[in-house]
Image (cartoon, rainbow, N blue to C red):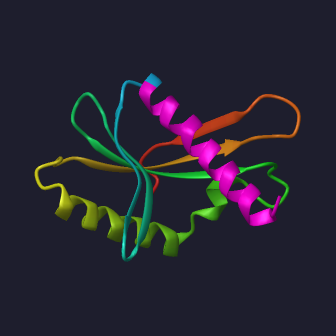
Amino acid sequence: MSTQREKNRLGRFGEEIAARHLGEDGMTVLDRNWRCRHGELDLIAREKRGTVVFCEVKTRRTERQGTPFEAVDEAKARRIRRLAAEWLKEHPGSGERLRFDVIGVVVPADGPVQLRHRREVL
């Protein structure tokens, strides 16, 4: 299997774990892998209180090359905010309160999957 294909599969697996986590946390997933000409948003969810949460998911096999959170730099954060504005244009009235989260998923070769959810980070 190609390296890129494996990376894509790992990313989809991480997004599935993250979506399940959001649901268990009481959120409703509104959109997954939403795309426009500027890029893609991984997960968009709504909390029970109505806050719309734009969630970037980063999945890794190990943290040897850095944590998943380190992959979300200021340029990536700006792009996510720009994409969120595009999503909101397509979904008017979706929410007045917004939040930007990052979920880091580590899927080691052996051992349990590790998930960390950082809220209001972007």
Q: Give whichever of 100, 108 is nearer the camera.
A: 108
Q: Quick check: 8 left or right of 52?
A: right
Q: Quick check: 6 left or right of 118?
A: right
Which residue is the extreme one toward the front? Answer: 1
The magenta stretch is 1-23
**Residue at x-position 39% and y-position 76%:** 38
Most common secondary structure along the magenta stretch: helix
Which residue is the extreme one toward the left? Answer: 93
**Residue at x-position 21% and y-position 36%:** 50
Q: Position of residue 44 (x, y in %)?
A: 36, 47
Q: Position of residue 58 (x, y in %)?
A: 61, 53
When the figure is inspected, residue 21 is found, relative to residue 122, above or below; the finding is above
Q: Position of residue 59 (x, y in %)?
A: 67, 50
Q: Position of residue 102 (x, y in %)?
A: 52, 50
Q: Quick check: 6 left or right of 98?
A: right
- 21 is within the stretch colored magenta: yes
**Residue at x-position 60% and y-position 48%:** 12
When the figure is inspected, residue 91 is found, relative to residue 80, above or below; the finding is above
Number of callouts = 0
- 59 is within the stretch colored magenta: no
Location of the C terminus by quadrant is bottom left
Location of the N terminus by quadrant is bottom right
When the figure is inspected, residue 80 is found, relative to residue 13, above or below; the finding is below
Quarter location, residue 39: bottom left
When the figure is inspected, residue 92 is found, relative to residue 2, above or below; the finding is above
